[in-house]
Image (cartoon, rainbow, N blue to C red):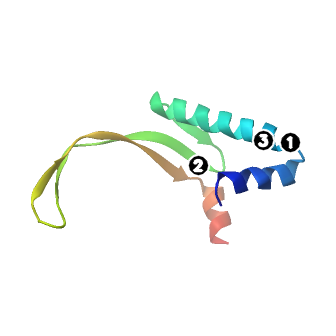
């Protein structure tokens, strides 16, 4: 399912207009992105938690040549699924 299909699904479930649902989805994703960017956790009970994690610098290998490559430290987004979400997926 892509973003457009998600919007259509929410429109069918709620009866709201497509433009209103699109605006709400954009606002929700923007709020989550901004919070994670500012090193805040976003916990949606029953669904999961979005957070920022730090990866340390490390040495990797170029798969074609086998040469060592330095990989810089980075902050990466992470999602951990909640119990209710996991249970629904596994049923």
User: Foreground mark, 2 or 1?
Assistant: 1
- SS at circle 2: strand
Disc 3 + disc 1, Cβ < 8 Å: yes
**Image position of 1 with respect to 41: above or below:** below
How busy is the neighbourhood of tag 3: few (under 14 within 10 Å), some, or many (20 plus)?
some
Residue marked by disc 2: 48
In screen coordinates, is 62 left or right of 53?
Answer: left
Residue occupying the point 79% across, 39% down: 19
What x and y, as percent, mark residue 64? 17, 67
Earlier sequence position, callout 2 versus callout 1: 1
- SS at circle 3: helix
For this orientation, the residue located farthest to the right is 15
Residue marked by disc 1: 17
- SS at circle 1: loop
What x and y, as percent, mark residue 62? 17, 61
Q: Which mark is residue 21?
A: 3
């Amino acid at each position: 399912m892509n973003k457009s299909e998600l919007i259509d699904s929410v429109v069918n479930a709620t009866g709201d207009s497509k433009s209103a649902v699109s605006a709400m989805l954009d606002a929700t994703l923007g709020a989550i992105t901004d919070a994670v960017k500012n090193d805040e956790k976003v916990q949606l009970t029953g669904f999961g938690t979005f957070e920022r994690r730090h990866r340390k610098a490390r040495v990797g290998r170029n798969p074609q040549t086998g040469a060592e490559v330095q990989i810089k430290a980075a902050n990466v987004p992470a999602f951990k699924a909640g119990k209710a979400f996991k249970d629904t997926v596994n049923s």
